[in-house]
Amino acid sequence: MRLTSLLPFVAVTALSLSPSAQAATTITWWHAMEGVLGEKVNAIAEEFNASQNDYVVKPVYKGSYSDNLTATIAAFRAGQAPAITQVFEVGTATMMNAKGAIYPVYQLMQDTDTPFDPDAFLPAVKSYYTSRDGHMLSMPFNSSTPVLYYNKDAFAKAGIETPPKTWAEVGKDAHKLVESGAAECGLTTAWPSWTQLENFSAINDVPFATQANGFNGTDARLVFDKQPATVGHIQDLAEWQKSHAFEYGGRADNGTKRFQSGRCAMLTTSSASRAGIQEAAKGKFTFGIAPLPYDAEAVSQPRNSIIGGASLWVMQGQSDKVYKGVAEFLNFLSSPSVQADWASFTGYVPITTAAYQQLKAEGFYAKTPGASVAIDQLTRGTPDDNGRGLRLGNMPQIRNIIAEQLEKAFNGSETAAQALTDAAKRGNAELEQFERSVSN
């Protein structure tokens, strides 16, 4: 064979081995999104992968938020941590205090010279993941806030024209709904600690814990039991329980089923539940979405609510190539088009002002009544020490404690004051344990 006949083969081989055509750098992303949300996560990764040839993002579902956090910690200790991991908002303090484990997002973007503007994010979202000195530590991803869902058909049957704005109005409407026969139950709730204590505190500008709810130090302690407005609110719910004006639906998202079935006419739960509620209510009843009520005796105007959901943390132990790819992916992920698509598909709020403006320009909010309630509620004013969120260690355990104690108040075995006192005492033991663990 003549040498010239080998030239096409040599050229093709050389091309296949060029840097741009060699195996792309893999970026592993652990997450807790299941079902259609997991499919959407995969689609986002595929879109990024198709947009360039240098990196391949590989999403890996690791179970629940708690499962993924546990797996991430174990993997880091074994030297096998993923490049990116999704951690729910109440795991923020744990990640912040995991010495040597995280690569702060602001630092990553600086080191890789990647465009990054923390002020592009909604203040109530940015503040949750920002350090005391103003640096964003993780990248917001899926953010939601609790809102009030109400059954329009039941309201009409009871002669109630508008959704309640205050908790006093909630009580009045809830009793009227039951007494008129329009509903078997007036109000139920999901995520009881998040909706009825954490967000109640933020909206009514009362502290949940000391040290700016933990933002100013790990020596924070729970004080929600010392707030008359908070104690009074839980006592009201306990009283309403006796007449079915309120029905405790259980922990996590279990209460949502009582609303979806038509039993309860009002529900406080995540704004991200909108699509699921819409599907469940189809053909049964029409529903509306309103802001969470406020306590008119505590504040003249409601403050901003706080978020739930999760952010993306970058883990230490990766190569420079991986980190460059991670920075580019996070930049892609926070772009207006990706965030607008994610928010419109899932029901989570757009995390940047630009994404919100894009959805607004596209007519999404005009076509989707109630979808703007969450973002309007989050952007009321500037978050203060009571409204930036919670940065408390062992918060998942504390939420379980709060749920246990709320159940005692709702079943009448303890007064609201006693239940909250016990919740704070038990929760503070968790905070003390966390403080010791991070100071060693």
Image: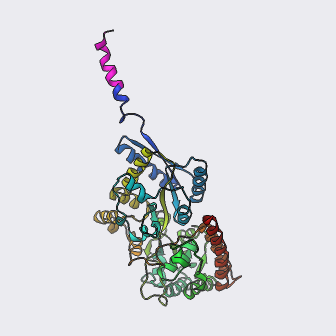
Q: Is residue 351 above or below residue 178?
A: above
> Which residues fall within the magenta stretch?
1-13
- Residue pictured at 39% horizontal, 71% vertical: 123
Which quarter of the rendering shows the C terminus? bottom right
| Predominant secondary structure, magenta span | helix
Q: Residue 406: x and y, percent?
A: 64, 77
Which quarter of the rendering shows the N terminus? top left
Q: Residue 88: x and y, percent?
A: 53, 62
Q: Residue furthest bottom?
A: 297
The mark total stands at 0
Q: Is residue 433 left or right of residue 46?
A: right
Q: Is residue 322 left or right of residue 100?
A: left
Residue 5 location, quadrant? top left
Residue 21 inside the magenta-drawn segment: no
- The answer to whether residue 250 is visible is no
Choose between 83 and 106: the one closer to the eye: 106
Q: Residue furthest front?
A: 440
Name the image colouring: rainbow
Q: Is residue 257 above or below residue 327?
A: below
Q: Residue 214: x and y, percent?
A: 54, 73
Choose between 69 and 413: the one closer to the eye: 69
Q: Which residue lies furthest to the top in this view?
A: 1
- The answer to whether residue 234 is visible is yes
Q: Residue 210: x and y, percent?
A: 55, 79
